Amino acid sequence: MGHNRNFPRRAAALAAVMALPLAGASAQRRAPEPVPRVMVATFQSADKDAGVRAADELRNRIARDVDARKLFVIPKGDISKTLEASGYPTTEALQPNDAKALATLLRADEYIDGVVTKTPAGVKVEARMILARDQNLGQPLPPVEAGKVEQAAAAISKSYQAAREQLAGEKTCYTLFREGKNAEAVLMARSALNKYPNGTIAAVCLASAYSALKQQDSVLAVSERIVALDPRNIPALRYLAEIYQGKNDPKAIQVLTRLMAADPSNDKLREDVIASLVRTGQAAMAVPIVEEALTQNPGDPKTLNIAWRVYLAANQLDKAINTGEEMVRADTSYADSAYFVRSAAAALSTNPTRAAQIVSQGIAKFPNNASLGVLQANALSKAGQNAQALAAIDKALAVNPKVENGYAIKLQILIAMNAAPDVVLNTIRTAQAAGVEKKTLAQFALKIGSDAYKAGNASKARPDLQRAVQFLTLADQLDPSADAKFLAGASSFLIGQSAVTEAQDTKSCALARLAKESFSAAQENVPAGLPTYPDAAKQLLTAIPQFTPAVDDQIRRFCK
Protein backbone atom coordinates (compact mmCIF):
# COMPACT_ATOMS: atom_id res chain seq x y z
CA MET A 1 0.00 0.00 0.00
CA GLY A 2 2.88 2.33 0.86
CA HIS A 3 4.24 1.76 -2.55
CA ASN A 4 0.89 2.62 -4.05
CA ARG A 5 0.60 5.72 -1.93
CA ASN A 6 3.99 6.97 -3.19
CA PHE A 7 3.18 6.32 -6.89
CA PRO A 8 1.74 9.74 -7.68
CA ARG A 9 4.73 11.49 -6.10
CA ARG A 10 7.25 9.21 -7.86
CA ALA A 11 5.43 9.55 -11.17
CA ALA A 12 5.58 13.32 -10.91
CA ALA A 13 9.28 13.21 -10.08
CA LEU A 14 9.91 10.88 -13.00
CA ALA A 15 8.00 13.22 -15.30
CA ALA A 16 10.11 16.12 -14.10
CA VAL A 17 13.29 14.20 -14.79
CA MET A 18 12.04 13.16 -18.23
CA ALA A 19 11.34 16.81 -19.04
CA LEU A 20 15.01 17.78 -18.47
CA PRO A 21 17.36 17.88 -21.52
CA LEU A 22 19.22 14.60 -21.93
CA ALA A 23 22.98 14.66 -22.03
CA GLY A 24 25.35 12.61 -24.15
CA ALA A 25 24.70 10.74 -27.36
CA SER A 26 21.01 10.24 -26.60
CA ALA A 27 20.51 14.03 -26.89
CA GLN A 28 21.51 13.82 -30.56
CA ARG A 29 18.87 11.27 -31.47
CA ARG A 30 16.21 12.47 -33.89
CA ALA A 31 12.78 11.16 -34.60
CA PRO A 32 12.99 8.51 -37.31
CA GLU A 33 12.13 9.57 -40.84
CA PRO A 34 8.52 8.72 -41.64
CA VAL A 35 8.02 5.78 -43.94
CA PRO A 36 7.49 6.98 -47.55
CA ARG A 37 3.98 6.48 -48.87
CA VAL A 38 3.02 5.59 -52.43
CA MET A 39 -0.40 5.79 -54.06
CA VAL A 40 -1.29 3.78 -57.18
CA ALA A 41 -4.08 5.49 -59.13
CA THR A 42 -6.46 3.88 -61.59
CA PHE A 43 -4.75 3.60 -64.97
CA GLN A 44 -6.18 5.06 -68.14
CA SER A 45 -7.62 2.58 -70.59
CA ALA A 46 -10.26 2.25 -73.27
CA ASP A 47 -11.44 -0.68 -71.15
CA LYS A 48 -12.39 0.72 -67.72
CA ASP A 49 -12.01 -2.67 -66.04
CA ALA A 50 -8.49 -3.03 -67.43
CA GLY A 51 -7.42 0.31 -65.89
CA VAL A 52 -8.79 -0.65 -62.49
CA ARG A 53 -7.30 -4.12 -62.61
CA ALA A 54 -3.85 -2.91 -63.65
CA ALA A 55 -3.75 -0.49 -60.71
CA ASP A 56 -4.97 -3.17 -58.29
CA GLU A 57 -2.42 -5.71 -59.48
CA LEU A 58 0.44 -3.22 -59.31
CA ARG A 59 -0.59 -1.98 -55.88
CA ASN A 60 -0.74 -5.52 -54.53
CA ARG A 61 2.51 -6.53 -56.20
CA ILE A 62 4.48 -3.60 -54.77
CA ALA A 63 3.05 -4.32 -51.31
CA ARG A 64 4.34 -7.93 -51.62
CA ASP A 65 7.72 -6.96 -53.08
CA VAL A 66 8.68 -4.15 -50.68
CA ASP A 67 9.26 -4.17 -46.91
CA ALA A 68 6.36 -2.18 -45.39
CA ARG A 69 8.83 -0.62 -42.94
CA LYS A 70 10.58 1.04 -45.91
CA LEU A 71 7.62 1.88 -48.15
CA PHE A 72 3.93 2.02 -47.29
CA VAL A 73 1.52 1.25 -50.13
CA ILE A 74 -1.73 3.16 -49.56
CA PRO A 75 -4.55 0.61 -49.58
CA LYS A 76 -7.26 0.67 -52.20
CA GLY A 77 -9.88 1.16 -49.47
CA ASP A 78 -8.32 4.45 -48.37
CA ILE A 79 -8.18 5.66 -51.97
CA SER A 80 -11.81 4.72 -52.68
CA LYS A 81 -13.06 6.25 -49.43
CA THR A 82 -11.34 9.58 -50.19
CA LEU A 83 -12.61 9.63 -53.76
CA GLU A 84 -16.17 8.93 -52.67
CA ALA A 85 -16.02 11.64 -50.01
CA SER A 86 -14.86 14.09 -52.68
CA GLY A 87 -17.59 13.09 -55.11
CA TYR A 88 -15.30 11.30 -57.58
CA PRO A 89 -15.95 7.89 -59.18
CA THR A 90 -13.64 5.18 -57.90
CA THR A 91 -13.21 3.32 -61.20
CA GLU A 92 -12.12 6.11 -63.53
CA ALA A 93 -8.63 7.45 -64.21
CA LEU A 94 -8.03 10.91 -62.77
CA GLN A 95 -6.82 13.99 -64.57
CA PRO A 96 -3.27 15.06 -63.60
CA ASN A 97 -4.38 17.85 -61.25
CA ASP A 98 -6.92 15.59 -59.57
CA ALA A 99 -4.39 12.79 -59.15
CA LYS A 100 -1.97 15.17 -57.43
CA ALA A 101 -4.76 16.49 -55.17
CA LEU A 102 -5.72 12.94 -54.19
CA ALA A 103 -2.09 12.06 -53.44
CA THR A 104 -1.82 15.15 -51.24
CA LEU A 105 -4.98 14.25 -49.31
CA LEU A 106 -3.65 10.75 -48.73
CA ARG A 107 -0.23 12.12 -47.61
CA ALA A 108 1.52 10.20 -50.40
CA ASP A 109 5.12 11.08 -51.18
CA GLU A 110 4.79 9.70 -54.69
CA TYR A 111 2.17 8.13 -56.88
CA ILE A 112 2.02 5.96 -59.96
CA ASP A 113 -0.32 6.32 -62.88
CA GLY A 114 -0.26 4.92 -66.36
CA VAL A 115 -2.00 3.65 -69.46
CA VAL A 116 -3.16 0.11 -70.26
CA THR A 117 -3.65 -0.98 -73.85
CA LYS A 118 -4.88 -4.37 -74.95
CA THR A 119 -2.70 -6.14 -77.54
CA PRO A 120 -3.18 -9.33 -79.57
CA ALA A 121 -0.83 -11.09 -77.16
CA GLY A 122 -2.19 -9.60 -73.96
CA VAL A 123 -1.58 -6.10 -72.60
CA LYS A 124 0.84 -3.22 -72.82
CA VAL A 125 1.30 -1.12 -69.69
CA GLU A 126 3.08 2.26 -69.59
CA ALA A 127 3.56 3.56 -66.06
CA ARG A 128 5.00 6.70 -64.55
CA MET A 129 6.20 7.53 -61.04
CA ILE A 130 5.37 11.11 -59.99
CA LEU A 131 6.37 13.10 -56.91
CA ALA A 132 3.35 14.33 -54.97
CA ARG A 133 5.04 17.64 -54.22
CA ASP A 134 5.15 18.55 -57.92
CA GLN A 135 3.19 16.74 -60.61
CA ASN A 136 5.74 17.89 -63.21
CA LEU A 137 8.45 15.78 -61.58
CA GLY A 138 7.91 12.36 -63.08
CA GLN A 139 9.89 9.28 -63.98
CA PRO A 140 8.69 7.19 -66.92
CA LEU A 141 9.08 3.50 -66.19
CA PRO A 142 10.00 1.11 -69.01
CA PRO A 143 6.85 0.02 -70.88
CA VAL A 144 5.91 -3.61 -70.44
CA GLU A 145 4.12 -5.98 -72.82
CA ALA A 146 2.93 -9.24 -71.29
CA GLY A 147 0.33 -11.92 -71.71
CA LYS A 148 -1.33 -11.07 -68.39
CA VAL A 149 -1.76 -7.97 -66.26
CA GLU A 150 -0.18 -9.80 -63.31
CA GLN A 151 3.02 -10.37 -65.30
CA ALA A 152 3.12 -6.69 -66.34
CA ALA A 153 2.61 -5.63 -62.72
CA ALA A 154 5.56 -7.75 -61.59
CA ALA A 155 7.87 -6.13 -64.15
CA ILE A 156 6.67 -2.61 -63.32
CA SER A 157 7.10 -3.20 -59.60
CA LYS A 158 10.70 -4.16 -60.22
CA SER A 159 11.46 -1.14 -62.40
CA TYR A 160 9.66 1.14 -59.93
CA GLN A 161 11.85 -0.05 -57.08
CA ALA A 162 14.94 0.58 -59.19
CA ALA A 163 13.73 4.09 -60.09
CA ARG A 164 13.21 4.90 -56.40
CA GLU A 165 16.96 4.62 -55.83
CA GLN A 166 17.30 8.23 -57.02
CA LEU A 167 14.72 9.67 -54.63
CA ALA A 168 16.74 10.06 -51.43
CA GLY A 169 19.53 11.87 -53.27
CA GLU A 170 17.02 13.98 -55.22
CA LYS A 171 15.31 15.01 -51.99
CA THR A 172 18.61 16.21 -50.54
CA CYS A 173 19.47 17.92 -53.84
CA TYR A 174 16.13 19.72 -53.77
CA THR A 175 16.70 20.88 -50.17
CA LEU A 176 20.19 22.17 -51.00
CA PHE A 177 18.88 23.92 -54.11
CA ARG A 178 16.14 25.63 -52.06
CA GLU A 179 18.83 26.81 -49.62
CA GLY A 180 20.92 28.25 -52.47
CA LYS A 181 23.68 25.66 -52.04
CA ASN A 182 23.77 24.92 -55.75
CA ALA A 183 27.27 23.44 -56.04
CA GLU A 184 26.42 20.95 -53.30
CA ALA A 185 23.08 20.27 -55.00
CA VAL A 186 24.93 19.36 -58.21
CA LEU A 187 27.05 16.81 -56.35
CA MET A 188 24.01 15.28 -54.66
CA ALA A 189 22.09 15.02 -57.94
CA ARG A 190 25.06 13.29 -59.54
CA SER A 191 25.17 10.88 -56.62
CA ALA A 192 21.47 10.11 -57.16
CA LEU A 193 22.09 9.52 -60.87
CA ASN A 194 24.93 7.15 -60.08
CA LYS A 195 22.34 4.98 -58.32
CA TYR A 196 19.82 5.26 -61.16
CA PRO A 197 21.43 6.65 -64.36
CA ASN A 198 18.11 7.13 -66.17
CA GLY A 199 16.64 9.18 -63.34
CA THR A 200 14.72 12.09 -64.84
CA ILE A 201 13.59 13.37 -61.42
CA ALA A 202 17.15 13.70 -60.13
CA ALA A 203 18.26 15.08 -63.51
CA VAL A 204 15.71 17.91 -63.25
CA CYS A 205 17.23 18.90 -59.90
CA LEU A 206 20.67 18.78 -61.55
CA ALA A 207 19.47 21.07 -64.37
CA SER A 208 17.91 23.46 -61.85
CA ALA A 209 21.17 23.69 -59.87
CA TYR A 210 23.16 24.28 -63.07
CA SER A 211 20.69 26.97 -64.07
CA ALA A 212 21.13 28.73 -60.73
CA LEU A 213 24.89 28.57 -61.29
CA LYS A 214 24.40 30.18 -64.77
CA GLN A 215 25.99 27.16 -66.45
CA GLN A 216 23.70 27.21 -69.48
CA ASP A 217 25.66 24.70 -71.54
CA SER A 218 25.27 22.16 -68.74
CA VAL A 219 21.57 22.96 -68.40
CA LEU A 220 21.16 22.39 -72.13
CA ALA A 221 23.01 19.08 -72.08
CA VAL A 222 21.10 17.74 -69.08
CA SER A 223 17.72 18.91 -70.42
CA GLU A 224 18.32 17.30 -73.80
CA ARG A 225 19.22 14.07 -72.03
CA ILE A 226 16.02 14.25 -69.97
CA VAL A 227 13.71 14.76 -72.96
CA ALA A 228 15.44 11.91 -74.79
CA LEU A 229 14.26 9.69 -71.91
CA ASP A 230 10.98 11.50 -71.28
CA PRO A 231 9.75 13.56 -74.28
CA ARG A 232 6.97 15.18 -72.24
CA ASN A 233 9.09 16.25 -69.28
CA ILE A 234 7.81 19.77 -68.61
CA PRO A 235 10.72 21.21 -66.55
CA ALA A 236 13.30 20.06 -69.12
CA LEU A 237 11.22 21.36 -72.03
CA ARG A 238 10.91 24.72 -70.27
CA TYR A 239 14.69 24.95 -69.89
CA LEU A 240 15.20 24.03 -73.53
CA ALA A 241 12.63 26.56 -74.72
CA GLU A 242 14.27 29.32 -72.66
CA ILE A 243 17.76 28.49 -73.94
CA TYR A 244 16.73 28.11 -77.59
CA GLN A 245 14.75 31.35 -77.48
CA GLY A 246 17.73 33.15 -75.98
CA LYS A 247 19.85 31.94 -78.88
CA ASN A 248 17.15 32.66 -81.49
CA ASP A 249 17.38 28.98 -82.36
CA PRO A 250 14.53 27.80 -84.65
CA LYS A 251 14.26 24.69 -82.45
CA ALA A 252 12.55 26.89 -79.84
CA ILE A 253 9.25 26.70 -81.71
CA GLN A 254 9.34 22.91 -81.88
CA VAL A 255 10.12 22.69 -78.17
CA LEU A 256 7.37 25.16 -77.25
CA THR A 257 4.86 23.16 -79.24
CA ARG A 258 5.98 19.95 -77.49
CA LEU A 259 5.75 21.72 -74.16
CA MET A 260 2.18 22.73 -74.84
CA ALA A 261 1.26 19.19 -75.89
CA ALA A 262 2.77 17.90 -72.64
CA ASP A 263 0.62 20.28 -70.59
CA PRO A 264 -2.56 20.83 -72.62
CA SER A 265 -4.62 22.16 -69.72
CA ASN A 266 -2.20 25.02 -69.06
CA ASP A 267 -3.94 28.02 -70.62
CA LYS A 268 -1.10 30.44 -69.90
CA LEU A 269 1.42 28.13 -71.50
CA ARG A 270 -0.77 27.83 -74.59
CA GLU A 271 -0.98 31.62 -74.81
CA ASP A 272 2.81 31.91 -74.43
CA VAL A 273 3.41 29.37 -77.20
CA ILE A 274 0.95 31.07 -79.52
CA ALA A 275 2.49 34.47 -78.79
CA SER A 276 5.96 33.08 -79.56
CA LEU A 277 4.76 31.56 -82.85
CA VAL A 278 3.12 34.83 -83.87
CA ARG A 279 6.14 36.90 -82.80
CA THR A 280 8.50 34.77 -84.88
CA GLY A 281 6.34 34.94 -87.99
CA GLN A 282 5.07 31.36 -87.72
CA ALA A 283 1.45 32.14 -86.92
CA ALA A 284 0.23 29.46 -89.35
CA MET A 285 1.63 26.83 -86.95
CA ALA A 286 -0.58 28.28 -84.22
CA VAL A 287 -3.81 27.95 -86.21
CA PRO A 288 -4.40 24.22 -85.46
CA ILE A 289 -3.65 24.93 -81.80
CA VAL A 290 -6.27 27.66 -81.46
CA GLU A 291 -8.82 25.69 -83.47
CA GLU A 292 -8.42 22.77 -81.06
CA ALA A 293 -8.83 25.24 -78.19
CA LEU A 294 -12.01 26.61 -79.80
CA THR A 295 -13.39 23.06 -80.03
CA GLN A 296 -12.64 22.46 -76.36
CA ASN A 297 -13.96 25.88 -75.24
CA PRO A 298 -16.83 26.83 -77.57
CA GLY A 299 -18.02 30.39 -77.14
CA ASP A 300 -15.31 31.26 -74.61
CA PRO A 301 -14.42 34.93 -75.25
CA LYS A 302 -10.82 34.59 -74.09
CA THR A 303 -10.20 31.68 -76.46
CA LEU A 304 -11.98 33.56 -79.26
CA ASN A 305 -9.72 36.55 -78.65
CA ILE A 306 -6.60 34.42 -78.98
CA ALA A 307 -7.95 32.80 -82.15
CA TRP A 308 -8.86 36.21 -83.61
CA ARG A 309 -5.32 37.48 -83.10
CA VAL A 310 -3.79 34.30 -84.54
CA TYR A 311 -5.99 34.40 -87.64
CA LEU A 312 -4.99 38.01 -88.21
CA ALA A 313 -1.30 37.19 -87.87
CA ALA A 314 -1.67 34.14 -90.14
CA ASN A 315 -3.43 36.31 -92.76
CA GLN A 316 -6.56 34.14 -92.61
CA LEU A 317 -8.68 37.25 -92.77
CA ASP A 318 -12.18 35.86 -93.30
CA LYS A 319 -11.75 33.59 -90.27
CA ALA A 320 -10.38 36.54 -88.30
CA ILE A 321 -13.37 38.74 -89.13
CA ASN A 322 -15.94 36.05 -88.31
CA THR A 323 -14.16 35.05 -85.10
CA GLY A 324 -13.85 38.69 -84.05
CA GLU A 325 -17.58 39.27 -84.48
CA GLU A 326 -18.31 36.14 -82.42
CA MET A 327 -15.86 37.36 -79.78
CA VAL A 328 -17.53 40.74 -79.25
CA ARG A 329 -20.96 39.09 -79.15
CA ALA A 330 -19.69 36.81 -76.39
CA ASP A 331 -18.10 39.66 -74.44
CA THR A 332 -18.66 43.30 -75.42
CA SER A 333 -15.59 44.41 -73.45
CA TYR A 334 -13.47 43.09 -76.33
CA ALA A 335 -15.13 45.60 -78.70
CA ASP A 336 -12.48 48.24 -78.06
CA SER A 337 -11.01 50.60 -80.64
CA ALA A 338 -8.21 48.13 -81.42
CA TYR A 339 -10.78 45.48 -82.35
CA PHE A 340 -12.55 47.78 -84.81
CA VAL A 341 -9.29 49.06 -86.31
CA ARG A 342 -7.75 45.62 -86.82
CA SER A 343 -10.92 43.91 -88.05
CA ALA A 344 -11.75 46.73 -90.45
CA ALA A 345 -8.19 46.73 -91.80
CA ALA A 346 -8.47 42.97 -92.38
CA ALA A 347 -11.80 43.32 -94.18
CA LEU A 348 -10.57 46.21 -96.31
CA SER A 349 -8.39 43.98 -98.48
CA THR A 350 -11.07 41.37 -99.14
CA ASN A 351 -14.46 43.01 -98.59
CA PRO A 352 -14.52 46.85 -98.56
CA THR A 353 -18.28 46.87 -97.95
CA ARG A 354 -17.88 44.79 -94.80
CA ALA A 355 -14.93 46.95 -93.78
CA ALA A 356 -17.13 50.05 -94.07
CA GLN A 357 -19.75 48.39 -91.84
CA ILE A 358 -17.18 47.53 -89.17
CA VAL A 359 -15.72 51.05 -89.33
CA SER A 360 -19.17 52.61 -88.99
CA GLN A 361 -19.79 50.56 -85.86
CA GLY A 362 -16.42 51.62 -84.50
CA ILE A 363 -16.89 55.31 -85.24
CA ALA A 364 -20.32 55.22 -83.60
CA LYS A 365 -18.61 54.02 -80.43
CA PHE A 366 -15.34 55.97 -80.79
CA PRO A 367 -16.19 59.10 -82.84
CA ASN A 368 -12.82 60.78 -82.23
CA ASN A 369 -10.62 57.81 -83.11
CA ALA A 370 -8.37 59.03 -85.93
CA SER A 371 -7.27 55.51 -86.95
CA LEU A 372 -10.88 54.55 -87.60
CA GLY A 373 -11.27 57.73 -89.62
CA VAL A 374 -8.32 56.71 -91.80
CA LEU A 375 -9.87 53.30 -92.41
CA GLN A 376 -13.22 54.90 -93.22
CA ALA A 377 -11.58 57.19 -95.76
CA ASN A 378 -9.72 54.26 -97.31
CA ALA A 379 -12.90 52.19 -97.56
CA LEU A 380 -14.81 55.08 -99.16
CA SER A 381 -11.99 55.67 -101.64
CA LYS A 382 -11.90 52.01 -102.64
CA ALA A 383 -15.66 52.25 -103.22
CA GLY A 384 -15.07 55.20 -105.58
CA GLN A 385 -16.54 57.77 -103.18
CA ASN A 386 -13.52 60.07 -103.18
CA ALA A 387 -15.27 63.27 -102.14
CA GLN A 388 -16.63 61.59 -98.99
CA ALA A 389 -13.26 59.91 -98.48
CA LEU A 390 -11.48 63.28 -98.59
CA ALA A 391 -13.86 64.69 -96.00
CA ALA A 392 -13.31 61.65 -93.75
CA ILE A 393 -9.51 61.83 -93.96
CA ASP A 394 -9.48 65.59 -93.31
CA LYS A 395 -11.55 64.98 -90.18
CA ALA A 396 -9.15 62.24 -89.01
CA LEU A 397 -6.11 64.47 -89.61
CA ALA A 398 -7.78 67.29 -87.72
CA VAL A 399 -8.09 64.95 -84.71
CA ASN A 400 -4.52 63.65 -85.01
CA PRO A 401 -2.18 65.05 -87.70
CA LYS A 402 0.30 62.27 -86.94
CA VAL A 403 -2.17 59.36 -87.27
CA GLU A 404 -0.54 56.42 -89.02
CA ASN A 405 -1.07 56.40 -92.80
CA GLY A 406 -3.26 59.51 -92.56
CA TYR A 407 -1.41 61.61 -95.12
CA ALA A 408 -0.60 58.58 -97.26
CA ILE A 409 -4.33 57.89 -97.65
CA LYS A 410 -5.03 61.58 -98.34
CA LEU A 411 -2.41 61.66 -101.08
CA GLN A 412 -3.89 58.52 -102.64
CA ILE A 413 -7.32 60.14 -102.61
CA LEU A 414 -5.99 63.38 -104.14
CA ILE A 415 -4.21 61.44 -106.88
CA ALA A 416 -7.39 59.47 -107.61
CA MET A 417 -9.29 62.79 -107.86
CA ASN A 418 -6.67 64.28 -110.23
CA ALA A 419 -6.24 67.14 -107.79
CA ALA A 420 -4.33 70.24 -108.87
CA PRO A 421 -0.53 69.86 -108.57
CA ASP A 422 -0.34 72.74 -106.09
CA VAL A 423 -2.84 70.99 -103.79
CA VAL A 424 -0.84 67.77 -103.88
CA LEU A 425 2.47 69.59 -103.36
CA ASN A 426 1.07 71.50 -100.40
CA THR A 427 -0.23 68.25 -98.90
CA ILE A 428 3.20 66.64 -99.21
CA ARG A 429 4.83 69.64 -97.51
CA THR A 430 2.21 69.64 -94.75
CA ALA A 431 2.78 65.92 -94.24
CA GLN A 432 6.52 66.51 -93.98
CA ALA A 433 5.94 69.17 -91.33
CA ALA A 434 3.71 66.71 -89.44
CA GLY A 435 6.61 64.25 -89.26
CA VAL A 436 5.68 61.80 -92.01
CA GLU A 437 8.77 59.90 -93.13
CA LYS A 438 10.51 61.63 -96.03
CA LYS A 439 11.10 58.36 -97.83
CA THR A 440 7.35 57.66 -97.89
CA LEU A 441 6.57 61.13 -99.24
CA ALA A 442 9.37 60.81 -101.81
CA GLN A 443 7.76 57.66 -103.16
CA PHE A 444 4.49 59.52 -103.73
CA ALA A 445 6.28 62.40 -105.42
CA LEU A 446 8.30 60.00 -107.58
CA LYS A 447 5.15 58.15 -108.66
CA ILE A 448 3.32 61.37 -109.58
CA GLY A 449 6.40 62.71 -111.38
CA SER A 450 6.99 59.45 -113.24
CA ASP A 451 3.36 59.34 -114.42
CA ALA A 452 3.56 62.97 -115.54
CA TYR A 453 6.77 62.26 -117.47
CA LYS A 454 5.13 59.33 -119.30
CA ALA A 455 2.14 61.52 -120.18
CA GLY A 456 4.37 64.39 -121.35
CA ASN A 457 6.63 62.11 -123.34
CA ALA A 458 3.57 60.87 -125.22
CA SER A 459 1.81 64.21 -125.61
CA LYS A 460 4.86 66.52 -125.73
CA ALA A 461 2.72 68.88 -123.64
CA ARG A 462 4.91 71.16 -121.59
CA PRO A 463 2.48 71.39 -118.61
CA ASP A 464 2.74 67.63 -118.10
CA LEU A 465 6.51 67.76 -118.35
CA GLN A 466 6.79 70.77 -116.06
CA ARG A 467 4.61 68.97 -113.49
CA ALA A 468 6.95 65.99 -113.85
CA VAL A 469 10.01 68.13 -113.14
CA GLN A 470 8.28 69.73 -110.16
CA PHE A 471 7.43 66.42 -108.46
CA LEU A 472 10.62 64.60 -109.47
CA THR A 473 12.76 67.39 -108.08
CA LEU A 474 10.78 67.30 -104.83
CA ALA A 475 11.19 63.50 -104.66
CA ASP A 476 14.96 63.87 -105.04
CA GLN A 477 15.06 66.53 -102.34
CA LEU A 478 13.11 64.33 -99.92
CA ASP A 479 15.03 61.14 -100.67
CA PRO A 480 17.82 61.46 -103.27
CA SER A 481 17.58 58.81 -105.98
CA ALA A 482 19.05 58.17 -109.42
CA ASP A 483 15.60 57.51 -110.88
CA ALA A 484 14.22 60.87 -109.75
CA LYS A 485 17.29 62.73 -111.06
CA PHE A 486 17.32 60.99 -114.44
CA LEU A 487 13.58 61.38 -115.07
CA ALA A 488 13.77 65.05 -114.05
CA GLY A 489 16.65 65.48 -116.52
CA ALA A 490 14.78 63.67 -119.29
CA SER A 491 11.68 65.80 -118.66
CA SER A 492 13.80 68.95 -118.73
CA PHE A 493 15.30 67.91 -122.07
CA LEU A 494 11.82 67.49 -123.61
CA ILE A 495 10.79 70.89 -122.23
CA GLY A 496 13.89 72.48 -123.72
CA GLN A 497 13.31 70.73 -127.04
CA SER A 498 9.72 71.99 -127.33
CA ALA A 499 10.65 75.47 -126.12
CA VAL A 500 13.48 75.97 -128.61
CA THR A 501 11.27 74.80 -131.48
CA GLU A 502 8.39 77.10 -130.51
CA ALA A 503 10.72 80.01 -129.84
CA GLN A 504 12.00 79.81 -133.38
CA ASP A 505 8.47 80.38 -134.70
CA THR A 506 7.32 82.95 -132.16
CA LYS A 507 10.60 84.80 -131.66
CA SER A 508 9.94 84.51 -127.91
CA CYS A 509 12.74 85.49 -125.54
CA ALA A 510 10.94 83.78 -122.65
CA LEU A 511 10.82 80.48 -124.51
CA ALA A 512 14.45 80.79 -125.51
CA ARG A 513 15.45 81.36 -121.89
CA LEU A 514 13.22 78.43 -120.81
CA ALA A 515 15.01 76.24 -123.33
CA LYS A 516 18.41 77.38 -121.98
CA GLU A 517 17.43 76.64 -118.36
CA SER A 518 15.88 73.30 -119.28
CA PHE A 519 18.90 72.04 -121.19
CA SER A 520 21.17 73.10 -118.30
CA ALA A 521 18.96 71.12 -115.87
CA ALA A 522 19.03 68.15 -118.23
CA GLN A 523 22.82 68.30 -118.46
CA GLU A 524 23.03 68.27 -114.66
CA ASN A 525 20.59 65.43 -113.96
CA VAL A 526 20.71 63.01 -116.89
CA PRO A 527 24.14 61.51 -115.95
CA ALA A 528 22.51 59.98 -112.86
CA GLY A 529 20.77 57.54 -115.22
CA LEU A 530 23.93 56.15 -116.83
CA PRO A 531 24.15 53.05 -114.56
CA THR A 532 20.44 52.16 -114.85
CA TYR A 533 19.42 53.61 -118.25
CA PRO A 534 22.73 53.70 -120.12
CA ASP A 535 21.40 53.88 -123.69
CA ALA A 536 18.78 56.54 -123.04
CA ALA A 537 21.15 58.62 -120.90
CA LYS A 538 23.90 58.52 -123.56
CA GLN A 539 21.48 59.58 -126.30
CA LEU A 540 20.29 62.55 -124.26
CA LEU A 541 23.81 63.59 -123.29
CA THR A 542 24.77 63.47 -126.99
CA ALA A 543 21.72 65.50 -128.03
CA ILE A 544 21.94 68.30 -125.45
CA PRO A 545 25.10 69.98 -126.89
CA GLN A 546 23.54 69.92 -130.35
CA PHE A 547 20.86 72.37 -129.16
CA THR A 548 23.24 74.73 -127.37
CA PRO A 549 24.27 76.89 -130.41
CA ALA A 550 20.66 77.32 -131.52
CA VAL A 551 19.51 78.33 -128.03
CA ASP A 552 22.37 80.80 -127.60
CA ASP A 553 21.57 82.28 -131.01
CA GLN A 554 17.88 82.68 -130.09
CA ILE A 555 18.73 84.46 -126.87
CA ARG A 556 21.09 86.78 -128.73
CA ARG A 557 18.43 87.57 -131.35
CA PHE A 558 15.20 87.56 -129.34
CA CYS A 559 16.31 88.93 -125.97
CA LYS A 560 17.27 92.53 -126.76
Image (cartoon, rainbow, N blue to C red):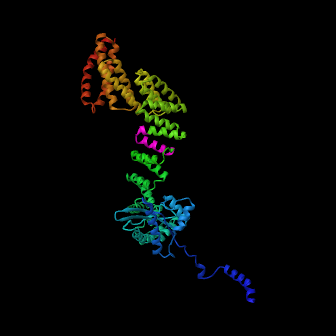
Q: Which residue is drawn at 75% across and 89% down?
A: 1
* Range of residues picked out in magenta: 301-319
Residue 282 % position (x, y): 39, 46
Q: Nearer the viewer, residue 449 or 369?
A: 369
**Prevailing secondary structure class for the magenta stretch in the rendered image:** helix
Give residue 446's quadrant in the image: top left
Instruction: Specify the farthest residue to the bottom.
Output: 2
Residue 400 visible to the viewer = no
Residue 395 % position (x, y): 51, 27
Residue 372 visible to the viewer = yes
Q: Nearer the viewer, residue 413 or 357?
A: 357
140 part of magenta stretch? no
Question: Against 77, is 391 above or below?
Answer: above
Residue 245 % position (x, y): 42, 52
Q: Residue at x 49, y 26 (%)?
A: 392
Q: Nearer the viewer, residue 253 or 178?
A: 253
In the rendered image, the quadrant that contains the C terminus is top left
309 part of magenta stretch? yes
Q: Nearer the viewer, residue 326 or 125?
A: 125
Residue 355 % position (x, y): 45, 32
Q: Which residue is drawn at 58% across and 78% down?
A: 29
Question: Against 390, is 158 above or below?
Answer: below
